[in-house]
Amino acid sequence: MRIPVFLIISLMLIVNSCNQSPPARSIDLNELTVDDIHAAYRAGTYTCEQLVLAYLNRMDSVNPAINAITYRNAEALAQARALDQEFKETGKLRPLHGIPMIVKDNYETAGLPTTAGSKALVNFIPQANAWMVQALIDAGAIVLAKSNMAEWAFSPMHTESSTFGITHNPYDTTRVPAGSSGGTAAAIAANLGVLGLGTDTGNSIRGPSSHCALVGIRPSLGLISRQGIVPLYLRNDVGGPMCRTVTDAVRVIQATAGSDPGDPLTYFGEGYVKADYLSYLRKDGLQGKRIGVLRFMTKAIDPGIEELFEQAIRDLRASGAEVLDSIDIPDFEILRQNQWCAEFRPDVEAYLAERVRIDSVQTIEDILRIGTKSDYTRRRLEYQRSHLDRPEGDIPCGSPFDDPLRLAFRKAIEQVMDDQLIDALIYPTWNYPPAHINRFEEEYRGDNSQVIAPHTGQPAITVPMGFNPDGLPAGIQFLGRLFDEPTLIEIAYGYEQGTKHRLDLKQ
């Protein structure tokens, strides 16, 4: 008996439709994690190419309201197809295989502009990737897009560039996502990517992460190379993850920690890099930990944030931690003074000469001549033009490994931690809710991230600690000893798993 051709074709169409993955637009992108995505790849639920297309489609619909994305990677779909083929041939997934990431626009990205938000760098298209970006690509991640940032990373208050304008907080678009990594924060919070990269000179990973209900890690200075990142103050600059979960943030640390001859500061991190940071993701990570509360960081605080912080202390105790309330650091107010050094001019001019190599952009004067759309940025450039070194005294500026003021500050903090057997110190990442965009300078207050960690070189992690009565996010910050990321990861993960404060924007 011969089967009619039309019946054969119909049967083939039915079989094919059963085997096809869902169209890109039907993939639910909300709160996806690396584990979720890899499980879907293994199950054949969708491909890397389909996932990337879904994120690009979501950008079309979501980004106009928040203005978080600058440049999209035109090669992202081709790179996704190559990773799909690799998986098909090997049956193996790399650690970050096919994971879309959003990269702040001061990281060098091969073939994509790296502007640091400035008109002076709109023609700078690097031929190679920054160290961190390349390490993540080697692990299988895909650069989906670059994100907007505060111009030259100057502002901790808001995220405004001369290249793409103002970024809005996705939880309330009338408010700031903080600065300067606000584009990455808004994009990851709005589920426009999975992994986010920010930079932190004083506040710029932890502040935006707190304002957007994310996990942000400022790693120890010297743990991860800064090669290929446009500098603000190299003595303080670090790159780090901004993600929706502690686990995914730690995956970024896992892929990027290590020494690099291109960044001499990583010499100090040698011997401290761990083979497996993921092994410290323990649900009982708070059991037996001693945590000290820095009450002097909350002298002025919004009542809604204060209540969230008090609840966080109760939650830490409920999860097995011993909380010491409160801890004093002798001579803290004296030690914290005179820690900043205005070294933007030498750092950025060296970067322009060594990496950008555009004849018309070599000095701060060139940057000012080309111009900026922001009065705030113009004032900062004018200040940096004429100020160098420390505002007071004749002690040379240096790294946290050779600067006597920085060494003394860290020693005082870690001595108290050692004497009282404290594993981490805590305080709200930001004592007030996000400011309104049109009043970002007047309402800027409560930024705790700039007080300790940038100067001492110590690592700090911010984790969502809930939402105030107006539905605005807040974060709790955990500060650890230099190069003691493992303990901080245990604590941060234990707190996250015991509270689950991160909320999908749909909720």
Image (cartoon, rainbow, N blue to C red):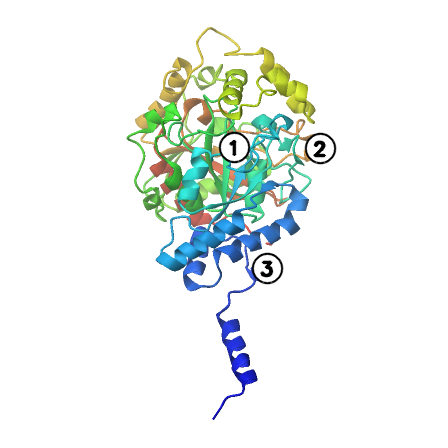
Residue 467 appears anywhere in the view: no
Left/right placement of residue 419 relative to residue 52 reads left
For disc 2, the marked residue is 438
SS class, disc 3: helix
| Separation (CA) of disc 2 from disc 3 | 35 Å
- Which quadrant of the structure image shows residue 316? top left
- Which quadrant of the structure image shows residue 265? top left
Work out whether 58 lies above or below 388. Answer: below
Q: Which badge, 2 or 3, comes first in the chain's sequence?
A: 3
Q: Residue 63 has which mark?
A: none
Quadrant occupied by the C terminus: bottom right
Residue under the point 38% across and 41% down: 255
Residue under the point 60% across and 28% down: 121
| Separation (CA) of disc 1 from disc 3 | 32 Å
| Separation (CA) of disc 2 from disc 1 | 34 Å
For disc 1, the marked residue is 126
Left/right placement of residue 379 relative to residue 288 reads right
Judging depth in this view, the residue of 396 and 73 nearest the camera is 73
Q: Amino acid at mark 2?
A: Asn
For disc 3, the marked residue is 25
Residue 176 appears anywhere in the view: yes
